[in-house]
Image (cartoon, rainbow, N blue to C red):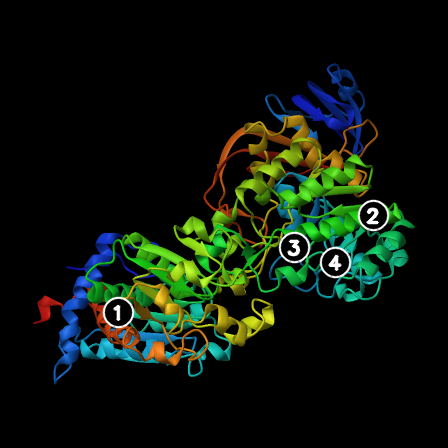
Amino acid sequence: MKLLLKGGRVIDPTQQIDEITDILIVDGRIAALGRELDKQAESGTAARVIDATSKIVVPGLVDIHVHLREPGFEYKETIASGSEAAAAGGFTSIACMPNSKPINDNRSVTEYILRKAALCGLVRVYPIAAVSKGSDGSVLAEYGDLWEAGAVAFSDDGKAVTNSALMLGAMEYAASYGLPVISHCEDTNLSAGTVINEGLASAETGLGGGPSIAEDIMVARDILIAEYTGQAVHIAHVSTAGSVRLIREAKSRGVRVTAETAPHYFTLTDDAVRGFDSNARVNPPLRSPGDVTAIKEGLRDGTIDAIATDHAPHGITDKEVEFEAAASGISGLETSLGLSLRLVDDGTLTLSQLIDCMTGKPSRILNLPGGTLKVGAAADLTVIDLNLPWTVDPANFRSKGRNTPFRGWDLRGKAIMTILGGEIKWAENS
Amino acid sequence: MALKRKDILDMKDLSVEEINLILDTADSFIEVSTREIKKVPTLRGKTIINLFVEASTRTRTSFEIAGKRLSADTINISGSSSSIIKGETLIDTARNLEAMNPDVIVLRHSAAGTPHMLARLVKPSVINAGDGAHEHPTQALLDLMTIKSKKGRIAGLKIAIVGDIAHSRVARSNIYGMTRMGAEVHVAGPATMLPRELAKMGVAVHQQLAPAIKDADIIMMLRIQLERQEKNLFPSLREYASYFGLNAKNIKLAREDVLVMHPGPTNRGVEISPEIADGPRSIILDQVTNGVAVRMALLYLLTGGPDETLT
């Protein structure tokens, strides 16, 4: 089984490659990169040739923060529909959060997710297991058993670990299996009863506004715990200028902290909630223009390592209700690349830096094998047409979650082919 | 003459021209309520549903009387008697009501933005009768009408709004309405009850009572709710009353002809002392009377008045 991608602009930040070249894939692995691969491609069984002229070829995109909702909330998303959405969005590896029902706090749920994902076979799915049993913030889950079953990190995402002693224990205990803890940073006393950011939008709408320091305070705490224990913590969905400042300072001192943000945090402000569109309800909430600027600066200077979607699909019944009763979250897998490419257009990142934020860097945070085109690596690749204009229409989403505040947005640039282990899993218009 | 809009959702969106049209129309309806037979046939055949998911006596009664004095058929649905408590969503309730072809749905709801959601999804006109801590536009309109009738103008007046601004839909709607009509609006309250970035709404913000009411033409006191104590917004009603309550002593800071308003229900002895609430400076009951006229005006303007083809 051979595949030859010809004439594309290949960008692989893990090898500092950004040039027009060909890629030969043999038996699901990257066999060679170079200009003179035709002979190699034709020897033995001839390779199928894909013309990538004027396209970008990158390592398969990696999203380390998605919610697949299965088991338990199959009406919102299934592992199959989420995998399809990921492939359509250009992703070949995704890590899913444990807040299913039952919660992924034990080996059988982890194994169930892996089995369903393998049956579907569209993307690599890496389960993140719960920090605490039932994610209720009291007792550590069985990390050894979960690690052996295939968990790649621990998080009580959606719920903050408010007990500092539990967080300290989690970081230390997870480290013995070489796994990081991912923290959803929220001081729940400060955010209680709030549904949007505290600012002019909350003053005008009367919707409960939560202070940005609800996030900052917990980021500061987790940095202190990581520093004290010498272990790794990854900060999920960074949304505030304060968090960026704290993480930047901690990194400069060598603290083992990494961070991600989501496209909505560098694209929208709390202005988006003024019409009471519950699709703009998300946690952490959309923040101020100053926060958006700081998030972009954090991406630019490397304080924020990765872009992750926090893909949070919901059913219509979860969203078509009173704003304050609506579920939080945005269905993000299929808009992530298009929105993130705007960072290249506005000069925040170079294309290579952006690709690094969506491939190599997130892979390293969770020690995943993907995110590279090195010879010998699994042939996970995404082909991108940077100039393809398209309009966000949730009706065309592969995800069951149609909840997006980006309906009707005109974007430029899209994944047009997703290759996993040398097999084409998704192609535009196929 | 009719309003060129389907719904009345908030003061934020109403222009000066629209506000003047509503107030002028309300003026002309005042007289109806003073007749011996308090009824005109203007809205005969129109159906108005008062959907009050959050409890209310004053506003619901005011809307019901307004509709009845215009000969509309008014139906009241309250939270406890509707299917909303049986687990039906607000949207389903609204679509079922819509299927019975009402002309206007008046909605009172404890969640901000619900009238906007309803207005997007159903055909009849929607009037916001108070949504969470967001807005209460008909209250602001009746307040503007009361001020205008007593003072002859709104522009140039110094108006103080005092109390829990953060949780007050009355304050929000009045801030929009009064500033738009040219008043100089001052707000005062404990720092914990003043929203961040409030000053960007075009008002002067004070953390003490005195500078807000000094030389004021109008003082509007807001109801303080005891449950805010649990959220550490203030320590006790006693302390609140002594620092933010309006009484015979501190009212002397205001102009001699100051008028005192309150959207009700009042906590006598807390935010307002009884001698002020019942005294000569109080126009609290005028507000209630004007409320009926303002709501008659809105129902009339939204439904386009009588259908001439049938008469």
Q: Name the residue at the bottom extreme.
A: B36
Name the foreground residue: B70 vs A409.
B70
The kind of residue tagged 3 is Ala
Rendering coords of residue A408 (x, y %): 45, 44
Q: Is residue A221 above or below residue B208?
A: above
Q: Can I make out residue A92 in this image?
A: no
Q: Is residue A246 above or below residue A24?
A: below
Per the rendering, the mark at residue A226 is 2
Regarding residue A162, the answer to whether it shows in the image is yes
Q: Are marks 3 and 2 on the same chain?
A: yes
Q: Earlier in the sequence, mark 3 or mark 2?
A: 3
| Residue A407 point in image, percent of width and height | 48, 46
The amino acid type found where label 1 is placed reads Asp
Subunit of label 3: A
* Numbered circles on residues, count: 4
Please tell me whether mark 3 sits on a helix, a strand or a loop.
Answer: helix
Q: Which chain hosts label 4?
A: A
Which residue corresponds to mark 4? A156
Q: Is residue A319 left or right of residue A84?
A: left
3 and 2 marks in contact (CB < 8 Å): no
In the image: residue B295, left or right of residue A276: left
Question: Please, which chain is the residue tagged with disc 1 on?
Answer: B
- Locate the C terminus of chain B and report the quarter of the image it occupies: bottom left
Q: Which x, y percent locates residue A153?
A: 80, 50
Image marks 2 and 1: residues in contact by CB distance under 8 Å: no
- The residue labelled by disc 3 is A214
Q: Nearer the viewer, mark 1 or mark 3?
A: 3
